[in-house]
Image (spheres, rainbow, N blue to C red):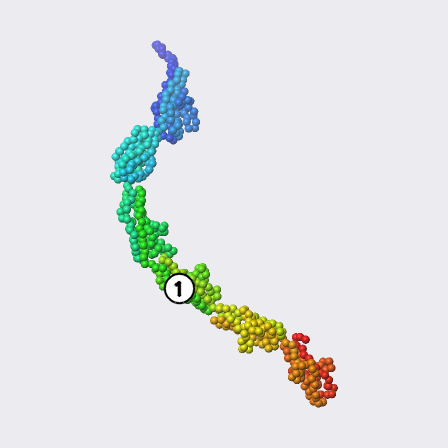
Amino acid sequence: MASNANGVTRASVWLLVREAPQVSIHTSSQHFSQGVEVMVSCSASGYPTPYISWSREGQTLQEDSRIHVDAQGTLIIQGVAPEDAGNYSCQATNEVGTDQETVTLYYTDPPSVSAVNAVVLVAVGEEAVLVCEASGVPPPRVIWYRGGLEMILAPEGSSSGKLRIPVAQERDAGIYTCRAVNELGDASVEIQLAVGHAPQLTELPRDVTVELGRSALLACRATGRPPPMVTWRRGDGQPLGLRLGAGRGSRSRQPDSGVLFFENVAPEDQASYVCEARNVFGKVQAKAQLIVTGHAPPQIASSAPTVRVLEGQPVSLPCIVLAGRPLPERHWLKGGRPLPPGSRYSIRADGSLHLDRALQEHAGRYRCVATNTAGSQHRDVELVVQVPPRIHPTATHHITNEGVPASLPCVASGVPTPTITWTKETNALTSRGPHYNVSKEGTLLITQPSAQDAGAYVCTATNTVGFSSQEMRLSVNTKPRIHMNGSHNADVPLRVTAKAGEEVILDCEAEGSPPPLVTWTKDSHPVPPITNRHGLLPSGSLRLAQVQGGDFAPEGCGQRQLGSL
């Protein structure tokens, strides 16, 4: 600036001084946890304005979607991971020089701790070992507490915490706390130590003998730490108190620990029973026998081995139980098999098997079986359903020729098997003879039938419950025979003398089966059966009215069987 009396003049001059860069980072180290965002600010002074860049472990930092440097030179790492830990350098450069500073990123993790076993069981006098596993960055120290009091501090740098109690006593039982601590915080976990001993029986069960139907109990008591659970079971594996096959549910119970109570003892309750006391440290067992007395096997009353009934009538097969304890159960078999369901059988209160209407299909051998737990007994009875005789329908009229054997069938059924007898006109026929023969099936055989065998025959079937009869007729065809004036010799001419004008009867009686037809001839010519002078009588004789001389001639009568020549 220059001035005088006439005024002032000013001029400016710029002096530029170049300065080397100087880097400034707000911290020399920084700790981070996984997943957070890390920002490290870096500023630099100097002239001209320096260019800022970052490197890691001497290598140029490669930027990506997760790691980048903003316009102010701040390093930003998003979603940081443990592998991002390390030395990062901020470098500032201008034409005068270069400067850098380094910051260290440390990965850290808050402590976490877990118990290997949340509950540790140990018997009195044995070594107890409580173990917890701790993790964190930096590694935490482990401290054990019991009831809020510090017990032991693990060595520095140890992440495994083990608490050992060489000779555990019951007073050592309780809750222990494992605490892990590092500069980021602490974490803890509780472990329960149980100190006890296996069960011991203080009252051994004793064998018990009880009468059928009474009550009984088996006692078994035990001590232990913790107190044991006492249970009972059958030595044969069957469920407790279950009536075998009856399905009535449990009849025994355990109202008090160690006491097994039986109500209304049954024979199936007789068994060996096992008492077991158990806790976390072990178990102990003892056996006792329950003996049931007073039971007896079934006894069935004797009865007739065979029962007979008329078909269609009701019948009962008895099965009376005289003795048995407990009360026996009864069931019936037919032919060794159970009675079919839905049949017409019914079992009455006294155990007898009843049929309202006995049929032939019900006949057979039946067995009543009485069973209880002491044994079983059975009785067999044969049911015979008797049926009156029935003669099966057949032809009632039979025809044969003289001399040709004839059979009259008579097929009958019934229970018992009926006997067949034959009669003719109230006369009994012998079953085996020269003329008549009756087969096993009841058929009457006539070996040489003649006219005298024709007639009515009666077949009678008889058994113990009735009879049945069937009438049959037998016709025997025979050749015609002529009787002339009492003479059987029709081949010799018979002389008849008569007065002219008188009536004359010429005898000609014929017999045969079926009845023959009689005809007359004169001089080999047929005589009409009816004319003014001739007439044929029913007997076959020829009546001549007013005999004339012309009537004199040999006359003959002939016969013809109906239905044959």
Does any portion of residue 411 appear in the rendered image? no
In terms of depth relative to the viewer, which is nearer, 86 or 470? 470
Q: Position of residue 311 (x, y in %)?
A: 47, 68
In terms of depth relative to the viewer, which is nearer, 82 or 486? 486
Tell me the residue at 31%/52% (across/down): 289
33 horizontally vs 392: left or right: left
Number of labelled discs?
1
Image quarter in which the C terminus is found:
bottom right
Crowd class of label 1 (few under 14; some 14 to 19; many from 20; radius 10 Å) = many
Identify residue for label 1.
319
**What SS does tag 1 mark?**
loop
Does any portion of residue 462 appear in the rendered image? yes
Query: Compared to 259, does 416 lie above or below?
Result: below
Q: Position of residue 188 (x, y in %)?
A: 31, 35
Q: Position of residue 472 (x, y in %)?
A: 57, 74
Query: Compared to 563, does 537 lie above or below?
Result: below
In terms of depth relative to the viewer, which is nearer, 290 or 406? 406
